[in-house]
Amino acid sequence: MMNMSVEDIGKLVKQEKDHEAKVRKAKEEAGRIIQEAEMKAKQIIREEAENDNTYDSLLKSEAMRLDGEKEKLNEERDREMERLRKKAQSNMDEAVALVVNYVLSEQE
Amino acid sequence: MIQDAEIQEIIDDAKSQAKRLIDEAHIKADETRKKETEKILIDRRETEKRQIESARFEGKKKIANIKFKLIEMALAEASKRLTTLAEKQDPTYNESLRKLIIEAGKAVTGQELELVANKKDSTFLKPKLKGIEKEISAAKGSPVSLRINEERPLSTAGIILRTVGGKEIFNNTIEARMTRARQELLVKISQTLFEGTKR
């Protein structure tokens, strides 16, 4: 064993105490860093869950797409109705004659 | 120095743990967003599918309605034309009266037949009655007698033929024939109107 003076021992004890204090402080700092991170993580998750903007815009774009589809269907329907009207208009005499002939002719 | 390294390690560990926590939170938030988005999209697509189906159905209904209206227009126009022909005693109409009586005469089984028509038509038919009677007899293969009952003339065009005593009645008024035309010609009218021969 090395011979140490009381002074040296005193220095060592002080160094040890200083180190322990630094470690304690570092651990406290580490705890604070982790606690802050945990809070931030919770906040990130909570904000995402509460974030309606993403879904609102998603719903809006879906609604617009649906409106577009409906519009297309309505246009197709209107075109078909117009086509039928025109066709019927040009064939009306023929259809009327068919009925008149049926009514005035002897049926089997 | 070794001691400082130990302290630095504590801080570094804490920082890397903090980074991991934040990274995990972002991943979890992304997953939540993806799941929610997917759920919303699935719900939305289902709703959309239902709404599109409903819009298609409504469209078909409107097309069916317009077809129905146009067919009704053709029938109304035919009815109007027939009324005009009858009122004017058009030769086509007068000739058809004979056919209508023969058709009815062939359909009833009785031998003694009575004809009811409106006054104008009765007047027109009277001189032709014997000839029509012969035609019915020939068609049936047995003699029939045909007379006009003028007690209660029709107010409409066409004829009603009945056996004396009223056991059998054949309604061949234009109105009754229009009803039959509506039942029997609906498909043909539709084809003529919407397919037709004119392109």
Image (spheres, rainbow, N blue to C red):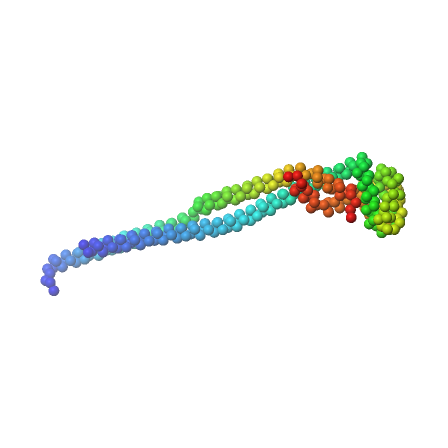
Horizontal arrangement in the rendering, residue B87 relative to residue B199 (left or right): right
The residue shown at (14%, 56%) is A11
Q: In this orientation, which residue lies closer to the viewer: B147 or A12? A: B147
Q: In this orientation, which residue lies closer to the viewer: B107 or B176? A: B107
The residue shown at (48%, 43%) is A61
Instruction: Tell me if residue B192 comes above or below residue A37 in the rendering.
Output: above
Residue sitting farthest toward the top? B88
Q: Where is residue B44 in the image (x, y as percent from the top left)?
A: 50, 48
The residue shown at (61%, 41%) is A80
In the rendered picture of this protein, how many numbered marks are placed on residues? 0
Q: Where is residue A74 in the image (x, y as percent from the top left)?
A: 57, 41
- Please identify the quarter of the rendering in which residue B61 is found: top right
Horizontal arrangement in the rendering, residue B165 relative to residue A19 (left or right): right
Residue A53 is at least partly visible in this image: yes
Residue sitting farthest toward the bottom? A1
The residue shown at (28%, 55%) is B13
Which quarter of the figure is the N terminus of chain A placed in? bottom left
Horizontal arrangement in the rendering, residue B76 relative to residue A45 (left or right): right
Residue B114 is at least partly visible in this image: no
- Please identify the quarter of the rendering in which residue A21 is found: bottom left
Q: Where is residue B93 in the image (x, y as percent from the top left)?
A: 80, 39
Q: In this orientation, which residue lies closer to the viewer: A106 or A42? A: A106
Q: Where is residue B43 in the image (x, y as percent from the top left)?
A: 50, 50
